[in-house]
Image (cartoon, helix red, strand yellow):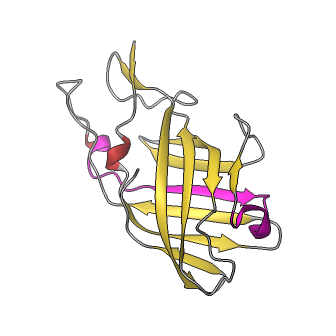
Amino acid sequence: MKTIPFPTDLLRVSHGSFKLRRDCWYLELNFHTFDLPNEYTDEFSDSYKDIETNFRIDFVETGFNEICGKCVEFESPNNAVDGSVYIGHAHHPVDLIKVDGTQLPKKKKNPGHLNFDALICFQFEGLGYSDGVEFEDTPCSFNLKLTPTKGGWDIEPTQPV
């Protein structure tokens, strides 16, 4: 079986949110619809066309003050962070690697940026993409522009880094 990196350039953010709670935060990115490339198989399943998905990281037990103005790295695998992305009829865990909050505003009413690195774990459930080809666990990075809203920030459309 051949394993290849997932084409993370397909993960273009349409919108999202970064919400804060007492001692944790939540991140949700919604992606533009995409098709997986047909370069590895002659049969292109309809389940890999017009994919609509989002990327969620919930209950990150790092308070706002612990990431604001700082770059925080997480041990991998980070079992304390619950994240996933749904592609190909399977939930793929997302392992948070690093959060760069150096451009987060100290006042939650101001705009800012949040950068983060993560690993999408496609090998956990597999994708069943085609005969002889699977996606390997693939790192991805995002630079998110934040606009203040009640309880956190909205995320403007961006491209993966």
Q: Can you say whether 60 is above or below 68 in the image?
A: above
Residue sitting at the far right: 23
- The image shows residue 123 at horizontal and vertical percentages of 53, 27
- The image shows residue 93 at horizontal and vertical percentages of 60, 41
- The image shows residue 21 at horizontal and vertical percentages of 76, 73
- What is the total number of numbered labels drawn onto the structure image? 0
Q: Residue at x 77, y 65 (%)?
A: 24
- The image shows residue 98 at horizontal and vertical percentages of 63, 47
Q: Can you say whether 27 is above or below 132 in the image?
A: below
Front residue of 141 and 10: 141
Magenta includes 113? no
Q: Residue at x 73, y 57 (%)?
A: 60
Identify the image quadrant of residue 91.
Answer: top right
Q: Residue at x 55, y 71 (%)?
A: 17
Which portion, as a residue range, is magenta?
Answer: 47-69
Identify the image quadrant of residue 66.
Answer: bottom right
Q: Can you say whether 65 is above or below 58 in the image?
A: below
Q: Can you say whether 24 is above or below 150 in the image?
A: above
Residue sitting at the far left: 42
